[in-house]
Structure formats: structure tokens, C-alpha cells
Image (cartoon, rainbow, N blue to C red):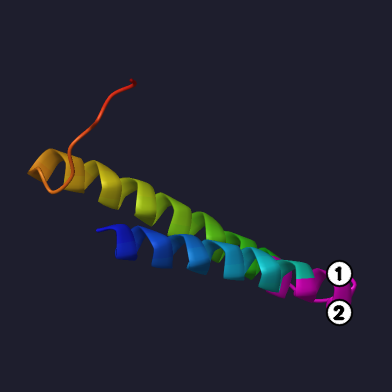
Amino acid sequence: MKFFVAIAFILILASLGSALVFLMRDKGKSNRTVQALALRVGFSIALFIFILIANYLGWIQPTGLR
């Protein structure tokens, strides 16, 4: 479970980094930056939904605040 979440965070950060590169290189002449940011939002939503489903199915347990 931790491995999947770590991979998802890496994908989110990679998408954010590629959006920055596209922003600097294209100077607003293409829509690659928007596509990269949309992909980042998609990864974030997918990760959130996966965590909700994993909690519902009992794959992860909340630990609470200590």
C-alpha cells in the first residue's frame, strides 16, 4: 500500500515538474502546460479515491491522533 502511494506521489510531482518545463520552454504558445497540470489533477483525484476505497475495504486502518 505504501509503495503504491509513494509511486502516485512521484507521478504527481513529475507531472508538476513537466508542467514547469513546458511553461518555460513554450512561453504560452502551446497547451502542453495545461495538459500536464490536468494530468496532475487527475493523478491527485485518483489517489484520493483509491485511499477512500482502501479505507472502506479495510486495506488500511486509521491510526488517529496520538
Q: Residue at x 69, y 68 (%)?
A: 17
Q: Amino acid at mark 2?
A: Arg
Q: Is residue 45 magenta?
A: no
State whether residue 40 is above or below residue 45. below
Residues in magenta?
21-33
In the image, taking residue 22 as reference, residue 38 lies left or right, namely left
Name the residue tied to disc 1: 28
Q: Residue at x 34, y 21 (%)?
A: 65
Q: Name the image quarter holding residue 63.
A: top left
Q: Quadrant of the N terminus?
A: bottom left
- The location of residue 49, given as percent across then percent down, is 30, 47
Q: Quadrant of the C terminus?
A: top left
Q: Residue at x 77, y 75 (%)?
A: 22
Q: Residue furthest bottom?
A: 25
Q: Name the image quarter holding residue 52.
A: top left
In the image, taking residue 9 as reference, residue 18 lies left or right, namely right
Q: Residue at x 65, y 63 (%)?
A: 16
Secondary structure under tag 1 reads loop
